[in-house]
Amino acid sequence: MNSFFELLKTRRSIRKYLPKAVETEKILQITNAALMSPSSKRSNPWEFIVVQDVEMLQKLANSRSYGSQLLADSTLGIVVVADTAKSDIWIEDASIAAIIMQLQAQDLGLGSCWVQIYGREKDETISAEEYIRRLLDIPAHYAVLNIVSIGYSNEERKPYAIENLSTEKIHTEKF
């Protein structure tokens, strides 16, 4: 990538992946980037579960009735959890770590997509969070924020066009 701004312009949500595994070195770089994420009072409430097992990715794909199925074709999913006892703003801290993983993946030539888990339902009997907590043996005091699917893109997405940005949402001095 030429610049951080170019990285931002080209990072798009990728939902279709090639059946090619992400190399261990790239996974390590993505997870190390997440570990360098800022957090409130350097509490580092986030933790990450790297999932590459095809059967487990299929189970994670069933965590919601809509929006998680892309994990079935992904070769890598990283579940973002946070120790809610460590920070009252764990959602913000974990969200920053998740987007840093996505930006690092983009910089490495990989596609990614955020799959929201927190506050979503698997079905009328169980939340997506509880389903994943049971599936991955996550302790009760950890919240499950999201899953970042990562892989080699099997779709073309155009970069953001600067002229189409909603610049009316930028205010100067006052709203």
Image (cartoon, rainbow, N blue to C red):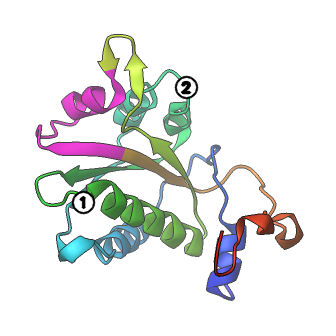
Q: Amino acid at mark 1?
A: Trp
Of the image marks 1 and 2, the number of the one nearer the N terminus: 1
User: Mark 1 sits on what residue?
Assistant: 46
Label disc, if present, on residue 66 of the rendered structure:
2
The residue most toward the bottom is 2
Q: Nearer the viewer, residue 12 or 155?
A: 12
- Note whether 39 is above or below 125 in the view shown: below
Corner quadrant of residue 140: top left
Instruction: Report whether residue 63 is seen.
Output: no
Q: Which mark is residue 87?
A: none
- For image coordinates 30% across by 33% down, the residue present is 129
Q: Specify start and end residues of the magenta stretch as a single range.
A: 127-145
Coordinates of residue 114 in the picture (x, y in percent): 51, 49
- Label 1 CA crowd tier, 10 Å (few <14, some 14–19, many 20+): many
Looking at the rendered structure, the secondary structure element under dot 1 is strand
Q: Is residue 105 above or below residue 2?
A: above
Quarter containing the C terminus: bottom right
Badge 2 amino acid: Tyr
Horizontal side, residue 168 vs residue 1: left or right:
right
Q: How many numbered marks does the figure carry?
A: 2
Query: In this view of the protein, which residue sits in the foreground, 137 or 24?
Result: 137
| Residue at (62% x, 48% y) in the render | 18
What's the residue at 34%, 46% (across, down)?
A: 145
Disc 2 is placed on an element classified as loop
Residue 106 in the image, given as x and y percentages of width and height: 58, 68
Q: Would you say 65 lies left or right of 89 here?
A: right
Residue 159: percent from the left, percent from the top? 78, 65
